[in-house]
Image (cartoon, rainbow, N blue to C red):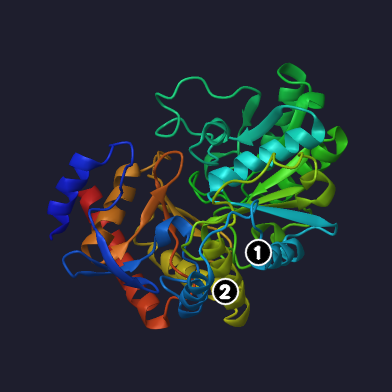
Amino acid sequence: MSNSALAARRSAAIARGVGVSSPLFATRAKNAELWDAEGQRYIDFASGIAVLNTGHGHPRVVAAVKAQIDAFSHTCHQVVPYESYVDLAERLNAAVPGDFAKKTIFATTGAEAVENAVKIARAYTNRQGVIAFSGGFHGRTFMGMALTGKVQPYKAGFGPMPGDVWHVPYPMAAHGIDAARSLEAIEGLFKADVDPARVAAIIIEPVQGEGGFYPAPADLMRGLRALCDKHGILLIADEVQTGFARTGKLLAMEHYDVAADLTTMAKSLAGGYPLSAVTGRAEVMDAPNPGGLGGTYGGSPLGIAAALAVLDVIRDEQLCERANVLGDKLKARLKGLQNEVPEIADIRGPGFMIAAEFIGADGAPLPAMTLAVRDEAMKRGLILLTCGVYGNVIRFLSPITIEDEVFDEAMDILSEAIRAAKKGLSA
């Protein structure tokens, strides 16, 4: 069946609130390649929004899941536990930054991980307030929406958000906001809006995902850690998109000289299988009473098996190192285009979590050109995603396992797409 015929069926059967960014319907995929319903091949630089750092169908991940299916697929850990849940918790406790004892829980989605982190923080501190950042994305559940710093399309039409959530500006060098301004805004909140003694946590993405792939400056992280320590507030690192080798480290917080109290993880943790986690200080994680955490599918045996294999692949195939190599190549290709296409105003990101921001000579964001780059790439067989508060950022999320020849092919397509978008802008 054609993509267009499937799109018509989809429109008739599925609520329009579930948006899509591509006209394709996938039928099969392998590593960084994907084939649609009409047999057309594409190079996947979206990875299901940063879920496939180890690629589509990595053989070791597939083998681990098949073996688990042959054993058992579900018991609910709260009813009949299983050793693999403990194995993965031990590995994450050891891997998450912080020189202190840690414990872990598992859930299903990134939004669930964030919700649970807030629950844990409130239980431990006996406080309610949470501070988040403009442009941040933390999920589509109600607390996730409240924490997310973007109204369209995430909050519009959904009524009042949960209370005691406060937003401050996130550093964006391309738009004149630095770490000092963000920290001053928090101090301003404490003076004008909320007593710091009522704040349970500050949540931050080490690199903003949906907000535009802006890395948090080191002085911001140090400043947040100092503020949290001063006022008895917990620091939550949302590593849902940044985790598992994407930034050149297993977790992005390894780039900083401070540690978070709680860390949320999902997406590439299980290589395409639903699984999320919260790892944090042992005494903090133990604050909720038994039964206060968990869920029917939380820590699914299939997701756990996949995640254990993903961690092995990252280690054995040295994907952190490969992320840095690929990221450097991508940055070099983009920088090589800047003289020809000065609208590529900023190229940023650690490891292979790279973005290009398009801004005009007058300093105005160029969302139309950004969409044109995405569409021109799609015509040529490369799947890209946009992001950013102004919709003027292309984010690059190829599997880190992408073959060199496929990566080089993608770079050629990207260059052609940017040139075509530039030509269309000038026409």
**Amino acid at pointer 1:** Tyr
**Amino acid at pointer 2:** Ala
Q: Where is residue 218 in the image (x, y as percent from the top left)?
A: 72, 52
Q: Position of residue 200 (x, y in %)?
A: 75, 32
Q: Is residue 135 left or right of residue 278?
A: left
| Residue 218 in the image: above or below residue 13 | below
The residue at 55%/56% (across/down) is 275
Q: Which of marks 1 and 2 is nearer the N terminus?
A: 1
Q: Position of residue 256 (x, y in %)?
A: 73, 57
Q: Which residue matches tag 1?
A: 82
In this rendering, the label closer to the viewer, 1 or 2? 1
- Identify the mark at residue 343; answer none if there is no mark: none
Q: In which quarter of the image is residue 157?
A: top left
- Considering depth in this image, is 187 or 101 the residue closer to the camera? 101
The residue at 56%/55% (across/down) is 266
Q: Which residue matches tag 2?
A: 309
